[in-house]
Image (spheres, rainbow, N blue to C red):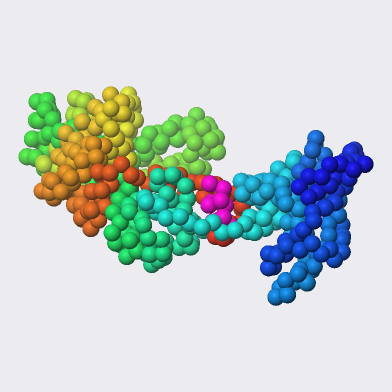
């Protein structure tokens, strides 16, 4: 059965099988064009069969058995003697697939790369390996970069922490322009010199990109990204808050609270009479009680093993207590005459504790004023049993450095009433943090209002205060003041560049370990 001729092709038969569709066709064009010299020829040399895979129909793959011819080239200067004809829209040189299926697989490869693309081709009834899909990407022609008027520049990681590249974006269209193999100033300068016409360059605060932009496009206006400038200011605020971390917690009770007359009298007695002599062992009370308990049980006829089990003592300890006639024998020796350094001050401490003064620091200062020479740790250890028996007090966690930094650098309207109250309390305790918050709010208003011309006056105000962290930020801004001023004035930013960097991360993960720069560049530029 003979079907009508379509664009130099005659379909002779179509067979619908259970597993595939088989199409028999032949080329019937009168002339063919030589791929070497471009001359048309009508002299047929011979013929042969080609088998092509086409896009699936009705869930079944399509196979085309095509009869084509070879033609003789008539040009005497051409190096080819014969050549095979190609059917427009169906075949291409050395192809085992139709042009339509080839284009579909190229789109699948660009969008999904290897493994994911291979899984999709199984659903499309055009089974292809992941390596073939990657080869299809690499066979595409290299995209020719255009020269945008507003260029965005940022780095991306080829191997995080080790190898980085540079992505160039057209800020107006948000489309990628080119990928560079590194993030060196010379590489960017070379690209800008080869593509003149860039008027505005949006970049972060990286020194290499600033130098490359000045060298490659000296007339272009550089715009520092506002987010990066604000991030630098936030880091300076974080360092400032860290330096004043002691001011973030509530101050302790006053060191000299009002004491009762009895406590004052006791304190005066300690100051006038001095330290009294003491010969009691520090564990005398416990030793006396244990000695009495052991001998009471012995008098009742209990064995030493039973006494040890009942009192929770070691057998050797019970034996030592049983042999001692009096408890003083157990405390005699080198420990006798070694009192606690707090013995003279214990009555006063108990009196003050009962009056409600439970601050170790306050009590330490009070007894130190009348002659106490011990450490604060000794006092805390002595007060610990009293504190554990007292009713628990609700502990209020002081704000962290990160919390206060966030409160200062966030918009006041985004803070909760509790956060606003805590921030006001912290700023009231620390004048430096209060001044820092004022400068940050002034900078935020300047940035949101696009009033970059106020930057010099703001820097002078910061320099007038004793704020080393903000001085460091101002020094960094002065070295890049024109770009920062443009960033605080013009509407351009590097937001589109950051979006493309995230897209590059996604493409790299799709290709697993196969994301070489040549392959990645074509996917980034051609699949945009």
Q: Which residues are magenta?
A: 519-528
Give residue 318's position: percent from left, percent from top: 47, 41
Residue 250 shows in this picture: no
Q: Nearer the viewer, residue 504 or 462?
A: 504
Q: Residue at (83%, 57%) from the top-left corner?
A: 68
Residue positioned 21% across, 26% down in the render:
356
> Most prominent secondary structure in the magenta stretch?
helix
Q: What is the x, y in percent for residue 96?
A: 78, 55
Q: Residue at x 24, y 27 (%)?
A: 421
Q: In the shown orientation, is residue 73 left or right of residue 293?
A: right
Q: Which residue is more in the foreground, 360 or 502? A: 502
For the N terminus, the image quarter is top right
Q: Position of residue 114 (x, y in %)?
A: 67, 51
Q: Nearer the viewer, residue 328 or 36?
A: 36
Is 524 inside the magenta-drawn segment? yes
Residue 350 vs 82, above or below: the answer is above
């Amino acid at each position: 059965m003979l079907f009508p001729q379509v664009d130099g092709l005659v379909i002779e038969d179509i067979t619908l099988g259970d597993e595939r569709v088989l199409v028999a066709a032949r080329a019937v064009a009168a002339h063919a064009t030589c791929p070497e010299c471009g001359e048309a020829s009508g002299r047929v040399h011979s013929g042969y069969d080609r088998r092509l895979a086409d896009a699936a129909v009705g869930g079944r793959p399509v196979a085309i058995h095509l009869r084509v011819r070879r033609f003789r080239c008539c040009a005497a200067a051409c190096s080819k003697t014969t050549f095979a004809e190609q059917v427009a829209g169906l075949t291409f040189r050395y192809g085992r697939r139709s042009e339509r299926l080839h284009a579909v697989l190229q789109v699948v490869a660009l969008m999904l790369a290897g493994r994911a693309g291979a899984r999709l081709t199984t659903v499309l009834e055009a089974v292809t390996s992941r390596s073939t899909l990657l080869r299809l990407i690499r066979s595409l022609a290299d995209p020719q970069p255009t020269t945008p008027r507003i260029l965005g520049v940022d780095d991306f990681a080829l191997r995080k922490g080790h190898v980085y590249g540079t992505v160039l974006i057209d800020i107006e269209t948000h489309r990628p322009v080119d990928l560079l193999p590194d993030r060196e100033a010379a590489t960017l300068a070379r690209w800008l010199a080869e593509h003149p016409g860039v008027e505005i360059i949006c970049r972060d605060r990286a020194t290499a990109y600033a130098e490359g932009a000045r060298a490659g496009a000296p007339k272009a206006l550089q715009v520092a990204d506002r987010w990066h400038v604000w991030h630098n200011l936030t880091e300076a605020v974080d360092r400032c808050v860290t330096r004043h971390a002691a001011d973030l917690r509530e101050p302790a009770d006053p060191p000299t609270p009002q004491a009762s007359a009895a406590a004052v009298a006791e304190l005066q007695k300690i100051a006038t009479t001095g330290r009294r002599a003491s010969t009691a062992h520090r564990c005398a009370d416990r030793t006396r009680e244990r000695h009495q308990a052991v001998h009471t049980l012995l008098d009742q006829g209990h064995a030493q093993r039973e006494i040890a089990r009942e009192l929770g003592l070691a057998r050797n300890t019970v034996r030592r207590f049983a042999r001692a006639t009096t408890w003083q024998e157990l405390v005699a020796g080198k420990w006798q005459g070694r009192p606690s350094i707090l013995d003279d001050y214990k009555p006063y401490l108990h009196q003050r504790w009962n009056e409600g003064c439970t601050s170790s620091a306050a009590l330490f200062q009070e007894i130190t004023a009348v002659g106490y020479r011990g450490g604060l740790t000794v006092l805390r250890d002595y007060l610990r049993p009293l504190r554990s028996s007292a009713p628990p007090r609700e502990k209020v966690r002081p704000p962290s450095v990160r919390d206060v930094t966030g409160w200062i650098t966030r918009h006041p309207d985004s803070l909760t009433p509790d956060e606003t109250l805590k921030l006001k309390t912290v700023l009231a305790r620390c004048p430096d943090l209060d001044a820092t918050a004022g400068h940050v709010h002034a900078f935020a208003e300047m940035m949101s209002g696009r009033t970059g011309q106020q930057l010099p006056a703001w820097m002078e105000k910061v320099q007038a205060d004793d704020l080393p962290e903000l001085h460091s930020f101002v020094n960094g801004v002065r070295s890049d003041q024109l770009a920062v001023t443009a960033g605080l004035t013009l509407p351009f930013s590097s937001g589109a560049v950051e979006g493309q960097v995230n897209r590059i991360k996604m493409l790299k993960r799709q290709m697993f370990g196969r994301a070489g720069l040549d392959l990645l560049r074509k996917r980034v530029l051609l699949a945009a």
